[in-house]
Image: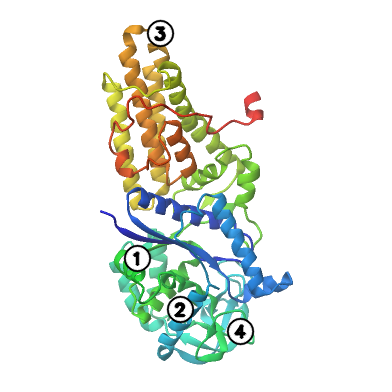
Amino acid sequence: MSQPIYITTPLYYVNAAPHIGHSYTEVAADCLARYRRLKGDDVFFLTGTDEHGEKIAQAAAAKGQAPKAFADQASDTFRQLWELLGIAGSYTRFLRTTDPDHEAAVQRVLTTLKSTLKLGTYVFWYCVPCETSYALTEIDPTAPVCPTCQRPLKQIEEEDYYLNLEEHREWLRRYIEDHETFILPTQRRNEVLALLGDPAHPLPDLCITRPKDRVPWGIDVPFSPAHVTYVWFDALLNYITALGWPEDPRFHRYWNEAGAVHLIGKDILRHHALYWPIILRVLGVRPPKTIFAHGWWKIGEQKMSKSLGNIVDPRIVITRLLAGQPYAADVYRYFLLREIPFGQDGMFSEEALMKRLDSDLANDLGNLVNRTCSMIERYHQGRVPASACFNSLDEEIVKQAEAAVRQVESAMERLAFTQAVEAIMQLVSKTNVYVEAASPWKLVKQPEQARRLETVLCVLAESARIIAILLEPFMPAVSTAMWAQLGFSATQPRRLGDAARWGQVPAGQSIGPHPVLFPRSEAKKEA
């Protein structure tokens, strides 16, 4: 039975070009969305760009542009990268915080909350690159630097509207303790509980406005012409404004009925795990189902960050480093999802990427698919034979395929992308071992083994079919190519339920053209 699920990424801040960290969140969300669709579920996948705030105004001024014109161009850069990564057709909505319906909904939220807000003059530390404020008691005044990006903080004194967080502290602490999967992984959950656990250090009030004379680029506060909405308050609300909060049926189906799964980087955990649930509580809206804060990609020991200027540009990796690979974007996707467990920090290097390409993809997956199709072409006139005589060797592959489906399902329920990929690649590896043990190139020379040869070729085609289905969320273009090489038409859908059933390649089906999926470079061929 089809189940609704709501999957979101953060809205990416458009002050500079996207980097590997943005693509990691986006690829993971797309993978989860594709997997749930593969199961037959009803998916709403939300992504977009965050376009207000002081940092955007500064970046636009530096280029001699109006903030909206700058945001238009920057938002398109993200859209183009998602298209390059095969994600553009997967998300349900790409929301921009400059969208009129979002701005109107934010103003409606402000009006709804007006009676709970207080106006006052406060002094706080502020990080412009992160657009994040800190109470004076949270920062060492002798070395006022941002805990996230290590940039200098500036002290600000101004009159704004504030939301009291401390009065909701105990409720949030109990809620997190009672809902083990609300914040994942466990390490991040424990970090938030530690912040909430000491009553001697009350939560600072959340400033939700900025004076218009200091930050003119923002959504106007409907009851105060002198203020605009604080960019983080504006951005967090996108998760409900995109669904037409509060009356739209989509809001009931995907938020109230399904529950949201927020995928974020751990650097914005505070905003999502502290501010956001409390904002929702004041609005009378249930918290999201899960907030999963993944780790950082690093070069050396330093976190990648646009504000630090040490980014890896996915476009360069795909179009230059992986030039000549027909499925370069999928190679990149595979590396992100395979290299490190989701939730941990990882190290990016060209060497690690190329090792995955050569070993996992070219030697194992690509070789298996090419051998399978080539042997069916040479040994059985390009048509998949019917299985004739199963033996224990064949049964082991059937069991391995069944296990792979179960392992992928279990891993994806836990957002354990790496474990899911490992299960698929273990099936690839076992099938390659099967090829060597069955030795169809020997069987073809023995006429009395014709029926055995047909069974081996059928087993290889079936294993490749199941691998193609399981790979769809992770490497959609490669999955589609494998599907076509096995002779399936584009109108024949790939479904997870079909992966669990052995014997779905029709006997007599003609395989398609089967060029090499992961060609080696000339330099490697010569070596």
Q: Label 3 belongs to which residue?
A: 445
Task: Compare marks 1 and 4 and give the one earlier in the sequence.
Answer: 4
* Residue found 44% across the figure and 69% down from its top: 242
Q: Position of residue 194 (x, y in %)?
A: 40, 70
Disc 4: which residue: 156
Q: What amino acid is found at the position of numbered circle 4 in the picture?
A: Ile
Kindly tell me whether residue 300 is visible in this rendering: no
Pointers 4 and 2 in contact (C-beta within 8 Å): no
**Vertical placement of 454 versus 83: above or below?**
above
In the image, is 511 to the left or to the right of 209?
A: left
Label 4: state its secondary structure. Answer: strand
Q: Which numbered disc, 2 or 3, marks the residue that appears first in the sequence?
A: 2
The residue wearing badge 1 is: 254
Q: Are marks 2 and 3 in contact (CB under 8 Å)?
A: no
Q: Secondary structure at mark 1?
A: helix
* Tag nearer the camera, 4 or 2: 2
Which of disc 3 and disc 4 is earlier in sequence?
Answer: 4
Q: Residues within 10 Å of mark 2 (few under 14, many from 20)?
A: many
The residue under label 1 is which amino acid type? Tyr
Which three-letter amino acid code belongs to the residue tagged 2?
Ala
Q: Earlier in the sequence, mark 2 or mark 1?
A: 2
Tag 2–tag 1 contact (CB < 8 Å): no
- Dot 1, crowdedness within 10 Å: few (<14), some or many (≥20)? many
Q: Nearer the viewer, residue 124 or 224?
A: 224
Helix, strand or loop at mark 3: loop
**Percent from the top left, x then y, of residue 62?**
73, 71
Are the residues at dot 4 and dot 3 in contact (C-beta closer than 8 Å)? Answer: no
Give the residue number, with chain letter if any, for mark 2.
Answer: 105
Chain-order first, disc 4 or disc 2: 2
Callout in the foreground (4, 3): 3
